[in-house]
Image (cartoon, rainbow, N blue to C red):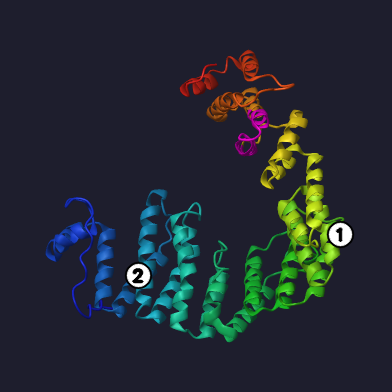
Amino acid sequence: MARKAAATGDKPAKARKGSKTTLSEANLVDLGPERLAAILLDLSSDSHVKRVLRLELFAEAGGDGLALEISKRLAAIGKSSSRIHWRKRVAFARDLDLHRRMIERLAEDDPTAALDLMLDLLDLATPVLDRLSQAEGPIGDVFLAARDGIGAIAAKAMPDPIALAERIAKLLRRDDYAQFGPLIGALGPALGPKGQAHLRETLEKMLAARSPRSAHLFDAQGAIYKDALRRLADASGDVDAFEATFAPELRRTPLVAAEIARRLLAAGRGEDALATLQAGSPHEQRGRHASSQEERAAWEEAMLEALEATGHHEEAQKRRWADFEATLSIPRLRAYLKGLPDFDDVEAEDQAKLVAKHFPRFDTALAFLVSWPDLAAAARLILTRSGEINGADETLMAEAARRLEGSYPLAATLLLRASIQHVLTYGVATRYAEAARQLLEAESLSAMIPDYGEYPDHAAFVADLRVMHGRKQGFRAELEALGGVF
């Protein structure tokens, strides 16, 4: 795998950055090949450097030698069963990743050999991760990178689809850390219809061979096989095969029903999607595990798509408006307005703002009006429902105050005050610095407020803070650091 010489002319000189003593590629080139070779040989007492140099030499000599050297190293790793101490994990990962990258180098000239080696590397995942106290970390990341990069190698190698299917099945059989599901998508093109069919048949046999388990026990290995079968079904566009991987009772849960329905919609089977969603409605979960908010949201989104696809636009609009009234969801309102005839959207938007004005949760109403945006309505909401302001939501308080301070300084000030009072009342020391900045910001806004109305002016507010929280030295120190006085 020797490097190809330039066809004509010399390569352009590397751009030099910094002084001649700066560690850069251009400056190292100036040392000359003999000097660099001597330095590298001296550094080769380090095992990693030595291995890098050996692999580079094999890469220059040709692909066969490089493949053999990588294979020997992978075999050595596979034979070891000792625990990998946490102090050695970074070095182990660096060595493993070196061989992964050299396999990718090999793929440039010999993709068939590279594919076999990358599969051998993936074979090591479970036994190597078993030698760790936790799978997450740099070593696990190497296997994920190998998994995600193997598709490009397989596309060049054009392997036998049946043999590749067998290798994937072997990996899934040992997939104790549930890492290899995405291989189905990455290697799907290389498998082709023949390989996919063989893998599907193999997985179904593996799944059928598992011993029956109690309904109360989770079968992790069986779940891996089913996930792979679902990915295969998606790869071939077989919705019925996807649905068949779920037990009948699971198909009647909102999240699974939504997943199946989305695929039915993509296949142009709107009525089937609607029926699937109706069977899995969150409202039909009597006696079953209650659906989470996320599951209900996913089901509702799929239901709206199914209603539109089957010509039930008015029902979809009713559901959108009902959902908005319950949640003040901006995406749901935008979709509702988009579905209205021309000019009806203005009246509907006004009605939506009225809903927000009287919404039970003040913070939700404020977030909606600030984000929509209708800053005038947001300011009115703050002034009319100031007793409901909750300063615990630091992100909402800060963002709303920032948006309002230019045109509605009193409303912005009330939000800042609520945030400051929450921090000091509950002694949230991590927010003392923020509260100090907010107090100074409120002071600057006071010059823009000609009339505080029923609310105390800034001096009176600060005086009340001193009475209630004068002993909070942490806050005092943060304020004085910013040039304020408490």
Residue 441: give its label: none
Residue 284: give its label: 1
The C terminus - image quarter: top right
Q: Amino acid at mark 1?
A: Glu
Task: Assess whether residue 409 is covered by the magenta stretch.
Answer: yes
- Lateral position of residue 297 relative to residue 182, left or right: right
Residue 102: give its label: 2
First in sequence: mark 1 or mark 2? 2
Q: Nearer the viewer, residue 464 or 207?
A: 464
Alpha-carbon neighbours of circle 1 within 10 Å: few (<14), some, or many (≥20)?
Answer: some
Establish if 193 lies above or below 180.
below
Q: Residue at x 83, y 56 (%)?
A: 288
Task: Assess whether residue 400 is covered by the magenta stretch.
Answer: yes
Residue contact at pointers 1 and 2, CB within 8 angstroms: no
- Lateral position of residue 157 relative to residue 199, left or right: left
The answer to whether residue 290 is visible is no
- Lateral position of residue 317 relative to residue 448, left or right: right
Residue range of the region highlighted in magenta in the rendering: 395-416
Where residue 265 sits, quadrant-wise, is bottom right
Q: Nearer the viewer, residue 357 or 221?
A: 357
Establish if 443 lies above or below 86.
above
Q: Residue at x 17, y 50 (%)?
A: 21
Q: Amino acid at mark 2?
A: Met
